[in-house]
Amino acid sequence: MEMMEDIEKDTVNFVPTYDNERREPSVLPGKFPYLVCNG
């Protein structure tokens, strides 16, 4: 999955899940420039 390929490089902050058993990324970055697309 292209969106998750750099997830191990500390590119995003991780937060605990609702039960504190795991950690999940706070955002899922994409390579498409959504800021430019959405103005």
Image (tube, rainbow, N blue to C red):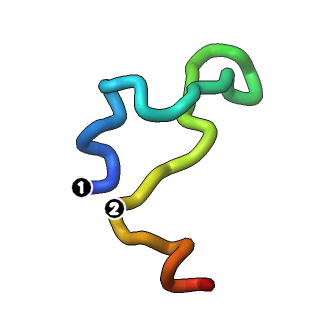
Q: Which mark is residue 2?
A: 1
Q: Residue at x 50, y 79 (%)?
A: 36
Badge 2, how many Cα within 10 Å: few under 14, some, many 20+? few
* Residue 28 screen position, x and y as percent: 50, 50
Helix or strand or loop: what does disc 1 sit on? helix
Image height check: is 10 above or below 12?
above
* Residue 18 screen position, x and y as percent: 75, 29
Badge 1, how many Cα within 10 Å: few under 14, some, many 20+? few
Which tag, 2 or 1, sits closer to the chain's start?
Answer: 1
Query: Residues at badges 2 and 1 in contact (C-beta under 8 Å)?
Result: yes
Judge left or right: residue 16 versus residue 38. right
Q: Which mark is residue 31?
A: 2
Q: What's under tag 2, amino acid-wise?
A: Lys
Viewer-closest of 21 and 24: 24
Depth check, mark 2 against mark 1: the one in front is 2
Viewer-closest of 35 and 5: 35
Q: Which mark is residue 12?
A: none
Q: Residue furthest top?
A: 21
Viewer-closest of 1 and 22: 1
Q: CA distance from mark 2 to mark 1?
A: 9 Å
* Residue 12 screen position, x and y as percent: 50, 34
